[in-house]
Amino acid sequence: MHPDCLILYVKSPAESVLFYSRLLGREPVEHHPNFAMFQLNESTTLGLWAAHDAQPASSVRGGGTEICVTLANDAAVEQAASAWEAMGWPVLQAPTAMDFGYTATTADPDGHRIRVFRPA
């Protein structure tokens, strides 16, 4: 088994597309009123599904998981956090040294966490 698609339940796919387009620096490969999909890499996609439309229905919402992005160095982590602030996104965790590396965290409009880090 090789999972190749992550799906987040979101309040507004249109609002989430704006967020993830800015975060990822690309447009979705698929975009409908209740669903959008981004190509993350050669074999992995990120789907944004309107929570009210998801089947089977789910009451679970953002904040219980993280999307993690590995960066090359501490400066890239700091640059990401500065960019988030400039865009008005929440900085849930300012650049910080932790056991696993140097990291910072933001959240999308639904509370799904996005973590960048430079591995230890």
Image (spheres, rainbow, N blue to C red):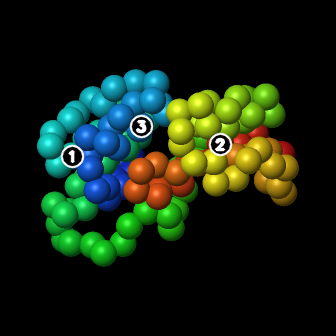
Mark 3 nearby-residue class (10 Å; few <14, some 14–19, many ≥20): some
Q: Quadrant of the N terminus?
A: bottom left
Mark 1 nearby-residue class (10 Å; few <14, some 14–19, many ≥20): many
- Residue 82 placement (x, y as % from top left): 67, 33
Identify which residue is drawn at 20% across, 35% down.
31
User: Which comes sooner in the sequence, label 3 or label 2?
Assistant: 3
Q: CA distance from mark 3 to mark 2?
A: 14 Å
Which element type, helix, strand or loop, lies under badge 3? helix
Q: Which residue is mark 1?
A: 35
User: Which comes sooner in the sequence, label 2 or label 1?
Assistant: 1
User: Which comes sooner in the sequence, label 1 or label 3?
Assistant: 3
Image-based side of 7 in relation to 64, left or right: left
Image-based side of 79 in relation to 48, left or right: right
Instruction: Give 82 or 77, whichever is nearer the viewer.
Output: 82
- Residue 39 placement (x, y as % from top left): 37, 33
Q: CA distance from mark 1 to mark 3?
A: 13 Å
Point out which mark residue 20 bears.
3
Image-based side of 110 in relation to 66, left or right: left
- In the figure, residue 55 lies in which quadrant? bottom left
Which element type, helix, strand or loop, lies under badge 1? strand
Q: Quadrant of the C terminus?
A: top right
Mark yes or no: residue 43 visible: no
Image-based side of 105 in relation to 25, left or right: right
Q: Which residue is mark 2?
A: 116
Instruction: Give 89 or 80, whichever is nearer the viewer.
Output: 89
- Amino acid type of disc 2? Val
Q: CA distance from mark 2 to mark 1?
A: 25 Å
Discs 3, 2 touching: Cβ within 8 Å: no
- Amino acid type of disc 3? Tyr
**Residue extending furthest toward the top:** 26
- In the figure, residue 72 lies in which quadrant? top right
